[in-house]
């Protein structure tokens, strides 16, 4: 006999209540402590300002801002302040590459030189224990996979020449920069060491350009930022957004916060990247906490945000594992909380995300559906201490 309608409704309500009770909840009291504790760093004059976000299962639970986006003009940091996210950009580039993998246009196991012929004939210059240098062909050419987990053998940046400071000057195209990188010698055999490399992720961005037949930043806009509704994320600041961009600060010799100006990677924030030509797939995206929440929520939901699929579940799973030869806790353009020496600490195993040079961080804990975003704009200072405190408070809010 069919169950009466009222009884069916009652059963559904009870089941929903049981399921909701079984899900980890966030403690509002712990979340309220986050801006209070972050304000302490501002009050001591150690950090200019911070935006923090904690979200869970498609909802933002806490979004706060403390301090200043512009100290000189007394402009407060707001929850919608736009910041340079620095190396969190690497994960955006990784997602762009994995979109091409999903479409069958990119094979991560293939040598880089198959997509960028300028890398043919690349050599390794390995330092021996006696101080001498051995220059030779690598045992195998670096693969796209090795670019993504920083095991290609490419150094961080060139040590000398006009491209050694491209992350500061931003004055060449991506194609020009990567052609120069291809002329550099590898500093280790591909696949043998984890060597964090801006050149490697820039090269990955160039592969995205070549295979998509679009500028890197245009592909990211059309396939990631646009579909996710990340309307405050970009590489070259439009005029309408400039007033919301936070300035970058650093402590001077006396510990007083001062504008970083020309010492800033990504270009002088006060100049809004005027005249820049380099999109910086490794470090140059601007964004907000709310936009980044959408991005990390998509990754935590196996490539889907709302009704839109950006990546396959298989692509997300492939990204979020430690592939480094020496177990450094780095997957395919993400840090992962696994391995012997995870790059992410104070988080649950399986959590993944990325940090950035100005103290920024974003993570997703798939087990608890917990997204965290941490956005200061500091070159130096106790941002790591503040991040650890934020991470502890956010994690301990799960009950």
Image (cartoon, rainbow, N blue to C red):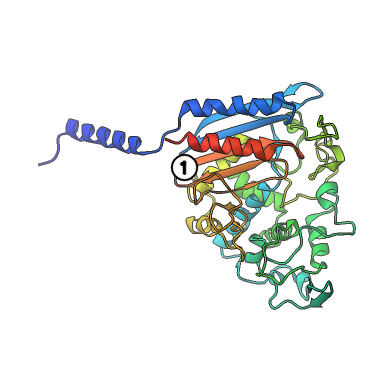
Pinpoint residue 122: horizontal percent, then vertical percent. Answer: 78, 73
Q: Which residue ends up furthest to the front in the rendered image?
A: 130
Instruction: Tell me the quadrant of the picture where the N terminus can be found.
Output: top left
Determine the image quadrant of residue 227.
top right
Confirm whether residue 232 shows in the render.
no
Kind of element beneath mark 1? loop
Please name the residue that numbered disc 1 is placed on: 369
* Rendered residue at 81%/76% (across/down): 134
Q: Left or right: 221 with respect to 7?
A: right
Figure check: 367 above or below 391: below
Quadrant placement of the C terminus: top left
Q: Residue at x 65, y 65 (%)?
A: 146
Give residue 303's position: percent from left, percent from top: 51, 50
State the residue in front, 168 or 236: 168
Label 1: how many Cα within 10 Å (few below 14, some 14–19, many 20+): some
| Residue toward you, 152 or 256 | 256
Coordinates of residue 364 in the picture (x, y in percent): 53, 45
Q: Is residue 20 left or right of residue 36?
A: left
Q: Is residue 48 left or right of residue 276?
A: left
Specify whether residue 205 is in view.
Answer: yes
- State whether residue 28 is above or below residue 313: above
Outermost residue, right side: 161
Position in image of residue 328 (x %, y %): 61, 58
Q: Nearer the viewer, residue 265 or 378?
A: 378
């Amino acid at each position: 006999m069919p169950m009466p309608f009222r009884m069916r409704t009652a059963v559904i309500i009870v089941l929903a209540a049981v399921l909701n009770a079984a899900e980890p909840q966030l403690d509002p009291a712990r979340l309220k402590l986050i801006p209070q504790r972050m304000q302490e760093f501002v009050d001591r004059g150690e950090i200019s300002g911070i935006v923090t976000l904690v979200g869970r299962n498609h909802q933002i639970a806490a979004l706060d801002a403390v301090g200043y986006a512009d100290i000189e003009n007394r402009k407060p940091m707001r929850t919608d302040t736009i910041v340079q996210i620095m190396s969190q950009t690497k994960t955006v580039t990784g997602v762009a590459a994995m979109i091409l993998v999903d479409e069958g246009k990119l094979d991560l196991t293939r040598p880089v030189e198959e997509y960028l012929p300028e890398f043919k004939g690349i050599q390794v210059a390995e330092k021996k224990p006696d101080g001498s240098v051995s220059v030779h062909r690598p045992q195998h050419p670096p693969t796209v996979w090795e670019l993504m987990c920083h095991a290609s053998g490419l150094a961080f940046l060139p040590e000398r020449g006009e491209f050694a400071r491209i992350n500061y000057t931003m004055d060449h195209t991506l194609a020009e920069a990567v052609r120069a990188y291809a002329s550099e010698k590898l500093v280790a055999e591909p696949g043998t060491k984890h060597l964090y490399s801006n050149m490697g992720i820039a090269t990955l961005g160039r592969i995205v350009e070549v295979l998509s037949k679009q500028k890197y930043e245009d592909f990211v806009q059309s396939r990631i930022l646009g579909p996710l509704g990340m309307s405050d994320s970009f590489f070259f600041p439009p005029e309408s957004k400039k007033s919301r961009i936070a300035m970058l600060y650093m402590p001077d010799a006396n510990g007083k916060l001062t504008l970083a100006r020309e010492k800033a990677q990504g270009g002088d924030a006060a100049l809004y990247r005027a005249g820049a030509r380099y999109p910086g797939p490794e470090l140059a995206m601007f964004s907000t906490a709310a936009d980044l929440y959408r991005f990390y929520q998509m990754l935590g939901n196996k490539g889907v945000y709302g009704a839109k699929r950006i990546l396959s579940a298989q692509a997300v799973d492939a990204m979020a594992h430690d592939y480094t030869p020496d177990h450094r806790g780095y997957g395919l353009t993400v840090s992962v909380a696994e391995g012997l020496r995870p790059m992410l600490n104070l988080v649950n195993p399986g959590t993944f995300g990325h940090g950035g040079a100005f103290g920024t961080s974003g993570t997703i804990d798939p087990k608890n559906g917990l997204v965290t975003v941490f956005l200061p704009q500091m070159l130096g200072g106790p941002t790591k201490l503040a991040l650890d405190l934020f991470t502890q408070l956010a994690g301990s809010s799960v009950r």
